[in-house]
Image: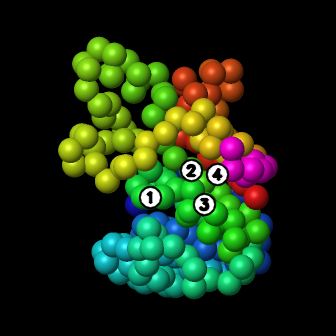
Amino acid sequence: MAFRKDLLLISSWIKPNTKVLDLGCGDGELLKILKQDKNITGYGIDNNINNLKLSLKKNVNVLQIDLDNGLEDFESKYFDYVVLAQSLQVIKNPKDLLNQMLRIGKEIIVSFPNMGHWSSRIQLLTTGKMPVTGNLPYTWHDTPNIHLCTIKDFLIFCETNNFEILEQFITDNNQKSNVFTKLLPNFFGQVATFRIK
């Protein structure tokens, strides 16, 4: 199984010998790699029983928690990094969750698919229907995504809530940045990844 390319960027931002909490950890691949390559300690959180089983098979410590119920049980600043990779759009109250992440982590890393990408805009314009893309592969009636946003939306959200962006990386689906994603990130970027404190 190939390592998800967005997780490569996220792992490059995480320092060795740190504590990491991976929210919506899926099959635990990020934590497995971080444990092997960077000697991190940490936990994954997921609500899907199949993902929990896959994580446990990889010797990843994992907890079954519904992220919409919050992270109140975790100590403040206990983790060096709290990661939310490609799950922001399925959270019922993103602002509350990001505030909780900033409370329990010294830094947070958030990535999400950009609804403002030109292909989504063209689909909506030409078909009059909600876009279906590689990053957003569901139709409107069966999607788990309830809070789709654009990069511009997220930047405004961070500014409004006084979230300090330390670093951002806007890429295509292959996690490559180019002149287009740098000049017009909201139009050409497909995946956005942010380090925040």
Left or right position of 77 against 33:
right
Of the numbered discs 4 and 2, the one sitting upstream in the chain is 4
Q: Which of marks 1 and 4 is in front?
A: 1
Mark-to-mark CA distance, 2 and 1: 13 Å
Of the numbered discs 3 and 1, the one sitting upstream in the chain is 1
Q: What residue type is labelled 3?
A: Leu
Q: Which region of the structure is painted magenta? A: 160-166
Mark 3 and mark 2 residues within 8 Å of each other at the beta carbon: no
Residue 176, image x, y percentages: 60, 36
Q: For residue 9, which numbered disc appears in the image?
A: 4
Say which residue appears at 41% left-offset and 22% top-offset: 121
Classify 10 Å Cα crowding around label 3: few (below 14), some (14-19), many (20 and above).
many
- Quarter of the picture holding the C terminus: bottom right
Please tell me whether mark 1 sits on a helix, a strand or a loop: loop
Q: Which amino acid does label 4 sit on?
A: Leu
Q: Which of marks 3 and 2 is in front?
A: 3
Please tell me whether mark 3 sits on a helix, a strand or a loop: helix
Mark-to-mark CA distance, 4 and 2: 10 Å
Q: Which amino acid does label 1 sit on?
A: Ile
Of the numbered discs 2 and 1, the one sitting upstream in the chain is 1
Mark 3 and mark 4 residues within 8 Å of each other at the beta carbon: no
Quadrant in the picture for residue 11: bottom right
Left or right position of 114 against 47:
right
Say which residue appears at 62% left-offset and 69% top-offset: 100
Of the numbered discs 3 and 2, the one sitting upstream in the chain is 3
